[in-house]
Image (cartoon, rainbow, N blue to C red):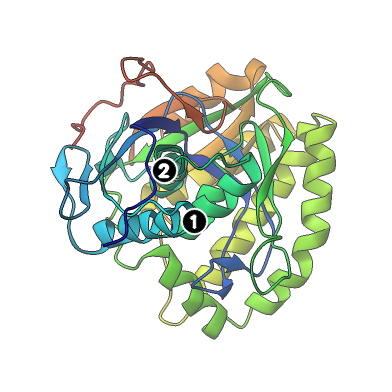
Amino acid sequence: MARSAPSHGPATFEAPPNIALVKYWGVRDPRLVLPYNSSISVTLARLRSRTRVRFDDDLRDDRVELNGAVAAGGPRAAVVAMLDVVRERSGVRARAEVVSENNFPTASGLASSASGFAALAGAASAAAGLELSPRELSRLARLGSGSASRSVFGGFVLWRAGSRADGRDSYARSLFDERHWPALVDVVALVENAPVKEVRSAEAMQATVRTSPDYPGRLETLPGRIDRIVRAIAARDADRLFPLVMEESDSFRGVCETTRPSLDYLTPGSRAVLAEVRALNRAAGRPVAAYTHDAGAHVHVFTLAPHLARVRRSIARVPGVRTTLVLRPGPGLHRVDPGSRTRAPRIPGRTGR
Ligand code: PMV
């Protein structure tokens, strides 16, 4: 057997999740994860996946541990697929040990695929001796989960859809770093009885592409909306940004609901949060908050520091809201020393596994 290229010792990386202000929903190439539309997100501080990868010639098979349990089936296969890409590019043939854990409860329903695959892209490529640029890391992370391409960068991030068939022009880049708009905060409303996802996002979005009569119209409106959102963020103008964020959230929810069979991610508690945000804005006579949600029941409510206490109190009181979590824009993917710690947010009511 030919000897494999030497690997480079274990590598540990951390990556945060992100919340999309303009949603990625629909792919033109499922294998290369090439989206129909560009998307924008905010990378979130304090939450993170931490992943350690070690290639070892003595291992007979890849060993994947996720949040303290040995992974099998689909989750393991997705990790192994990314390891295979890294092996092919680096010439390393050895099997790998992957140990990954989140500092937020997996069962909480907060998206972990973006943080998980961004951290894996960083750790696997470094352990294999590949020195990838942030752009290359973004393209690699994209193969695991589209939204992971954005978690490579901190702050405000744009993932360009690109148009090439080989995907080389489909990667994320930083629009503004995490210090750009210190007053902007995200109050996450964690709702009670958030259902566990029945259909993976990657499949659900393709059902939307195939069956929602509103999907083509959504794609047409997106370039203009993206333009306006980038300009509102650049100007730190919440009066312009917040209505656009809700318009986009409504458009995303609309194409989900008109998918056949219909995709309904929200609980009565989530819907009550949307109503509360509308009521807060009506009462204030201007947009003091903006809601958005992903393919899940929890709702992210953006507001500005001066309104934070009031908005958080109102959201926490909504029936069906279990707890709220205040998150700010944070840094993206980075390498960490094995012993280092990130202060974990306290999310009461559930354990880590
Ligand atoms: O990256 P995926 O395959 O988990 O899909 C993410 C889809 C949304 O979260 C709904 C939108 C987005 O852009 O993050």
Which of 282/138 is in front? 138
Of residues 305 and 49, the one drawn nearer to the viewer in this rendering? 49
Camera-nearest residue between 18 and 143: 143
Disc 2, SS: loop
Q: Relative to 226, is 330 above or below?
A: above
Residue occupying the point 54% across, 43% down? 19
- Distance from label 1 to label 2 (Cα)? 9 Å
> Callout 2: few (<14), some (14-19), or many (20+) C-alpha neighbours within 10 Å?
many
The amino acid marked with disc number 1 is Arg
Residue 58 image point, x, y percent: 17, 45
How packed mark 1 is, by other alpha carbons closer than 10 Å (few <14, some 14-19, many 20 or more), is few
Q: Is residue 235 left or right of residue 195?
A: right
Determine whether, in the image, residue 146 is placed left or right of residue 159.
Answer: left
Q: Hey, which quadrant is residue 68 in on the image?
A: top left
Query: Which residue is the site of mark 1?
Result: 89
Q: Which mark is residue 128?
A: 2
Image location of residue 285, percent across then percent down? 75, 33
Q: Position of residue 90 (x, y in %)?
A: 46, 51
Q: Quadrant of residue 123?
A: top left
On the image, the x and y values in percent for residue 333 come to: 52, 33
| Image quarter hosting the C terminus | top left
Q: Secondary structure at mark 1?
A: helix
Asked if the residue at label 2 sits under 8 Å from ligand 1, the reply is no
- Please state, as top left, top right, bottom left or bottom right, where the N terminus lies in the image: bottom left
Q: Nearer the viewer, residue 350 or 104?
A: 104
Q: Are marks 1 and 2 in contact (CB under 8 Å)?
A: yes
Residue 223 lies in quadrant: bottom right
Q: Amino acid at mark 2?
A: Ala
